[in-house]
Amino acid sequence: MSRRRQVFLGCSLLLVFILQLAVIPQFKILGVQPDLILVLAVVVAVQDGPVEGAIIGFIGGMMLDLASHQVVGVGAFSKALAALFAGLLKDFFMTYSILLPVLLVFLASIFELSLHQLALMMLGQEQLPPFKLVGLVLPAALFNVLTVFVVYTILKRFRFPLKEESMIVTRIGGS
Amino acid sequence: MPATPRSNRNRIILIVIVIVCVTLVTLYVRESETGPLHDIQNFFVDMVSPLSSSFSKIFRPIKDGFVNLFHLPSLSRQKEELQKEVASLRRQGVESKELEAQVKELKRLLNWTEQRPEYETVAADIVGQSPDNWQRLMIVNKGSSDGVKKYMSVVTEEGLVGRTIAVGSNSSVVQLITDSRSGIGARDLRNRETGILEGRNEETLRLVPMNDDAVMQVGDGVETSGLGLTCPPGITIGRVYKVTKREKGMSRLVEVRPFVKFSQLSKVLIIIMPEPEKAILKEAE
């Protein structure tokens, strides 16, 4: 990953964090809101690799944990694992269609929300009945899917490939 | 297959993330509310809350629009219901104000009848006004079936209104004292001088004293004299408003402004008298 890409992802994470904290809660539908940090982490995992996605998920989740009075580390843990899971799952699909990140965000959302709730329940922080969990997880996952198109397109537009990668792309294009 | 340096790096990073998360969670849960992680969290919350608050203010109108968009069908239904409710409440408000005014007026009329127990009266609602500018008439909803007869006096608490000039079974026409054909026996309260109070189709009346030399002053009270036998004596009419001195043989003009506000009337009392018409005829003879 190029330095410029790293800076761009850092700025994106900061922007998404602000949006997630201050703007997104204003637009809840059916009591749920999209998790832009998770979407960003999964898209990064798809475009740049599972570890990069996991790092984004970890930092973003940690920031949200700190800002939202949650148990510090739970959100970071669940988001990092979900991004990693999505990044690893990507290798099983031989496609570059936009539907791939859509599917991966959907699956990662279900995984992350379930893991998050499970962790909180294990820590005795929250006791959500299973049927309510389903009622929360599915709409939230669908809501996340709606935001994938925007996040994926923007992140793809600013890939900032390394010099070696650019040369390979140019040679393949030229031959 | 030997692991590549990249996959080794990935594994290390992942292990670090997991260890860090588990450690942080454990520390956070085990430490007290004043522990370092809680302090960091409180500091972070303090740092981001102004940001969140200001964004919340900025985005509130958009949020409201967003919410309204989703609630548009129910909002439109609610709007219709609220509009109906508002219309109904307005109607009720107007009705209650009307009722309040009626009660006030009835109380005043009741007060008048209580002060003059010697008179038998009938309360009537004004249901119509004269349709042209040439007459000053009112139609009331009481007629011969209520004991009303021609030439009975019509009053309110403020004073004399007029007299009935036509009586149907359930309605009567009242000629106001301001009507140009109206003439009533009146008396100056200060000097007891009598005269005829004539209507002029205007807001004021003209008092013609019996005695040409009678001294009439502005501000003198005027009441009914009882002469003519149709109108009981002692009913207030108004106050002398203007006295124009006679010049070159012209008779003097004494203008009286009645106490009754004719434009605001809605209820009146009709004083029931035995045979006012016969009394007039007898007087004429």
Image: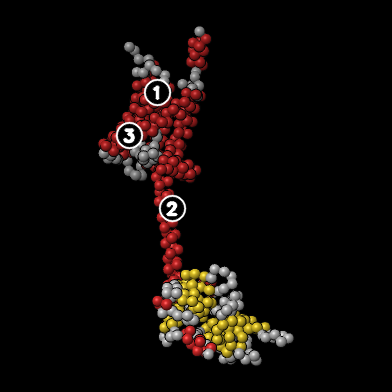
From the viewer's perspective, is the residue at label 2 or at label 3 nearer? 2
Q: Are marks 2 and 3 on the same chain?
A: no
Residue B258 falls in image quadrant: bottom right
In x, y percent, where is residue B213?
Answer: 65, 91
From the viewer's perspective, is the residue at label 1 or at label 2 nearer? 2
- Mark number displayed over residue B83: 2
In x, y percent, where is residue B33?
Answer: 34, 44
User: Under tag 1, what secondary structure?
Assistant: helix
Which chain letter goes with mark 2? B
Please name the amino acid that badge 3 sits on.
Answer: Val
Residue A121 in view (yes/no): no
Please name the amino acid that badge 1 sits on.
Answer: Leu
Q: Residue at x 40, y 23 (%)?
A: A99
Please name the amino acid that badge 2 sits on.
Answer: Gln
Residue B207 falls in image quadrant: bottom right
Quick one: A25 or A126, which is closer to the camera?
A: A25
Query: Earlier along the polypeptide chain: callout 1 or callout 3?
Result: 1
Is B11 situated left or right of B124 in this image?
left
Residue identified by numbered label 1 = A99
| Within-10-Å neighbours for mark 3: few <14, some 14–19, many 20+ | many
| Within-10-Å neighbours for mark 1: few <14, some 14–19, many 20+ | few
Which chain letter goes with mark 1? A
Which chain letter goes with mark 3? A
C-alpha span from label 2 to label 3: 40 Å
Q: Residue at x 57, y 79 (%)?
A: B181
In x, y percent, where is residue B159?
Answer: 51, 80
Is B242 situated left or right of B176 in this image?
right
- Mark number displayed over residue A137: 3
C-alpha span from label 1 to label 2: 48 Å
In x, y percent, where is residue A27?
Answer: 42, 39
Quick one: B258 or A125, which is closer to the camera?
A: B258
Above or below residue B66? Residue A50 is: above
